[in-house]
Amino acid sequence: MLPVAHAFVLKQFNKRMNTVTQEINSANLPVDMLRQQAFDPVEAFGSIATVKRLLAGSGEQTDSFWYNE
């Protein structure tokens, strides 16, 4: 991804996340309801080792979430 595109996507992401956060906070949702929506990466990816590898990966690897500038 080009650095200019990355900056644009990041700006849009932050704008949308701030809006979602404000809406969730103002809705006074029960904590239990929010916990039901929690994402467990170990359950999704199979092991703690896999999750650690994904989070530690660089943009050069195929098993990575990160963008390298």
Image (spheres, rainbow, N blue to C red):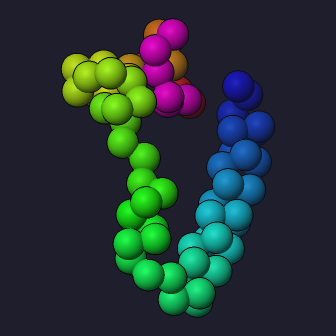
Secondary structure mainly formed by the magenta segment: loop
Q: Position of residue 22 (x, y in %)?
A: 60, 81
Is residue 22 shown above or below 17? below
Q: 11 or 31: nearer the eye?
A: 31
Q: Position of residue 37 (x, y in %)?
A: 48, 57
Asked which quadrant contains residue 45, the reply is top left
Q: Quadrant of the C terminus?
A: top right
* Residue drawn at 45 percent across, 68 percent down: 34
* Residue drawn at 57 percent across, 78 percent down: 24
Residue 10 at least partly seen: yes
Q: 24 or 6: nearer the eye?
A: 24
Q: Quadrant of the N terminus?
A: top right
Asked which quadrant contains residue 41, the reply is top left
Does the magenta-highlighted stretch encompass residue 21?
A: no
Residue positioned most to the left = 49
Total tally of numbered discs in the picture: 0
* Residue drawn at 46 percent across, 15 percent down: 63
Asked which quadrant contains residue 5, the reply is top right
Residue 55 at least partly seen: no
Q: 44 or 57: nearer the eye?
A: 44
Is residue 18 shown above or below 64? below
Does the magenta-highlighted stretch encompass residue 64?
A: yes
Q: Position of residue 67 (x, y in %)?
A: 55, 29
Q: Position of residue 57 (x, y in %)?
A: 38, 20
Magenta segment: 62-67
Q: 48 or 65: nearer the eye?
A: 48
Is residue 36 shown above or below 67? below
